[in-house]
Image: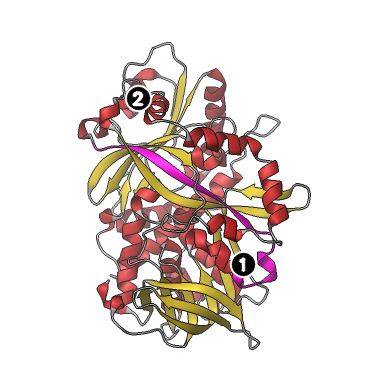
Amino acid sequence: MSQSLTSRTPKPKYDVVLIGGGIMSATLATLLHEFDPNLEIAIFERLGRFAKESTAAWNNAGTGHSAFCELNYTPEKPDGSIDITKAESIAEQFEISKQFWAYLLTKGYIHEPKEFINSCPHMSLVFGEKDAEYLKKRHDKMAESVLFSGMEFSTDHEKLREWIPLVMSKRNQSEVMAATKMDMGTDVNFGTLTRKMGRHLLEDSNVEVFLYHEVKDIDAREDGKWEMKVKDRINSHKQEVVADFVFIGAGGYALPLLDSSDIKESEGYGGFPVSGQWLVSHNQELVEKHQAKVYTQATVDAPPMSVPHLDLRIIDGKKALLFGPFAGFSTKFLREGSYLDLPESVNTKNLKSLFGAWWHNIPLTKYLIQQVAMTKSQRMQHLREFIKDAKEDDWELKVAGQRVQVIKKDEKEGGKLEFGTEVVVNKSGTIASLLGASPGASTAVYAMLNVLEKCFPEKLHGEWKGKLLEMVPSYGQKLAENPALTNEVRNYTKEKLELEY
């Protein structure tokens, strides 16, 4: 992408400015350019390459989040029944992503799907009678939905040995274990996918990409447009750029930029940065015995994004195993950010939210302190709950990306820690920001269509509707209520994405 590093400077005015070069901005830019190729769009990315922060391959788990294996999406209700509403919603959102990627391949905008998406069974694994009962109930409920059709369940050690030989090695036959398996799961390299989209935008569209350019401030003008201070980090050149519409997709830096815009909707938002670490093994003997992504229950007081899982990863054609995540803490909002990010984000508008969230999450603070203090040997002990004879020499510790969990105003508690992804839009629909983490990248297309629904509703349901249905054939329909459409869409994306389930 070196073409963008020429000495050219941004124009003083654009129709659309996208801040950040991750999966969200690349997706939104591609959507907007497809809807209206005449739109003048600029993307500003502070680093020298697309997808270097949260979207980078090792900075996330690479799980195509379809709610097949993530137990926190299927809570047990007080009456003992299982609520799969959120699971169905997330499964549908990932189907939207797959349709959009299939469209990009059909148009020849991107190539070689195996470089960014591969089939990988998604499994849930639990230990003990109580959790095995829960998993059975969960399976029975999910099996009623077309979105989870084909999900297998077993408590039989022989069957589990077929599915996960590495995990079952040296297990006591009397140990109660249960698992579900969905062969339709995927492993996704979101970094590669984002760079493929970025290359298309750079070479085959009139979208202007500026790397090493950082947006420092966003101010509303009297005419309703937005004025940004943009710094060229290579040449130390600063200039002002005006846009009709701004999208802030800057990962952890979205929060301070949103705050600088002074929109009413941003009031009370705070950020809680959490970093992660993985244990990673490139030992191919181990890899061959574990060809799945296996999620289990989160421990008490652990945040949802700390659910332990042992995953197959396929990055740049090489297979590896990843175990974690172990939570860490840093005051940075980005991996390549500043240690002053958190203290500088505190202001009179969000102080109450921050204090409220901290006060009601003291167990979480304690959990994070314990996690940060762990030695590699202690982390290996956690891994040995999955792999009985895991050897320290086979595993290295790898630091993952920074996540900034959203803290929102809450009338009762002052502030509440949120673990999802949230789109914040001003009343006039001229500025939007994406905050939060999981399920994040997997649902990028749904999230960006959500932005367009809020900011360009007339166009999306008017002149852009035909193109939208070409890109996402199931748009506007609930797959959970339409088995025929679900199967049609899944067969189409399976073929285009060259999936092998």
Image coordinates of residue 451 in percent, x first then y, are 56, 68
Image coordinates of residue 278 in percent, x first then y, are 38, 39
Image coordinates of residue 74 in percent, x first then y, are 57, 39
In the picture, residue 46 is in which quadrant?
A: bottom left
Q: Which residue is mark 2?
A: 387
In the picture, residue 201 is in which quadrant?
A: bottom left
Residue located at (48% from left, 60% from top): 251
Q: Is residue 374 left or right of residue 171?
A: right
Of labels 1 and 2, earlier in sequence is 1
Magenta residue span: 260-282
User: What's the residue type where badge 1 is placed?
Assistant: Asp
Disc 1 is placed on an element classified as helix
Residue located at (44% from left, 54% from top): 442
Is 212 or 304 nearer to us in this picture?
212
In the rendered image, residue 276 lying in the magenta stretch gets the answer yes
Q: Would you place residue 128 above or below residue 414 in this image? A: above
Q: Which residue is mark 1?
A: 259
